[in-house]
Amino acid sequence: MKVLIIDDARAVRAVIGRFLGELGFTTDQAEDGAKALEAVQHRGPFDLCMVDWNMPVMDGFQFVTAVRANPEWAAMKLVMCTTETEFERITQALGAGADDFVMKPFTKEDIQSKLAGLGLCDPP
């Protein structure tokens, strides 16, 4: 399965990439939503996008909205990776089409559990 990791922090992309690699996923990376949309258009679609909320240029919410506006990408799973803890913000992301969310900081088991809930891997 192909995963696009979208986060403006290189270290976070590396950690998520390592976790997903250990789970058998193939990963690609983008540092903001605009570059992620380009990746989806040219190298996708992806099976899953792990999306940071707060990024420059295009944030995660805008990325989710753009992806869900394109029927060709309807099958892509979108998981928000965020420090946003306000229930309203989480509800907003899910309402826009995110499939789930994981709160930072997280562990490999946290990510694996979320992906298992989406049917993308075995539970931890």
Image (cartoon, rainbow, N blue to C red):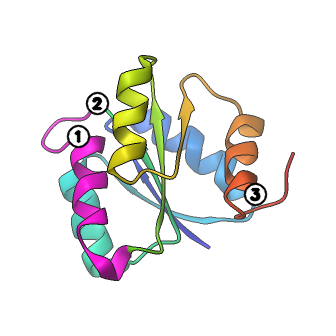
Q: Is residue 123 above or below residue 2?
A: above
Q: Check disc 3 and report its element: helix, strand or loop.
A: loop
Work out whether residue 90 or residue 82 is closer to the camera in this orientation and state it: 90
On the image, numbered disc 3 is attached to which residue? 23
Q: Is residue 79 left or right of residue 70?
A: right
The quarter of the rendered structure image containing the N terminus is bottom right
Residue sitting at x 26%, y 77%: 41
Q: Give the image location of residue 42, x and y in percent.
A: 27, 80
Of discs 1 and 3, which sits in the foreground? 1
Of discs 3 and 2, which sits in the foreground? 2
Q: CA distance from mark 3 to mark 2?
A: 26 Å
Most frequent secondary structure within the magenta stretch: helix
Q: Is residue 56 above or below residue 76?
A: above
Which stretch appears magenta?
55-73
Farthest residue, direction left: 57
Q: Amino acid at mark 2?
A: Asn
Farthest residue, direction top: 86
What number is the disc on residue 54?
2
On the image, numbered disc 1 is attached to which residue? 59
Q: Give the image location of residue 31, x and y in percent.
A: 29, 46
Q: Check disc 2 and report its element: helix, strand or loop.
A: loop
The answer to whether the residue labelled 1 contacts the one labelled 2, judged by CB atoms less than 8 Å apart, is yes
Q: Check disc 1 and report its element: helix, strand or loop.
A: loop
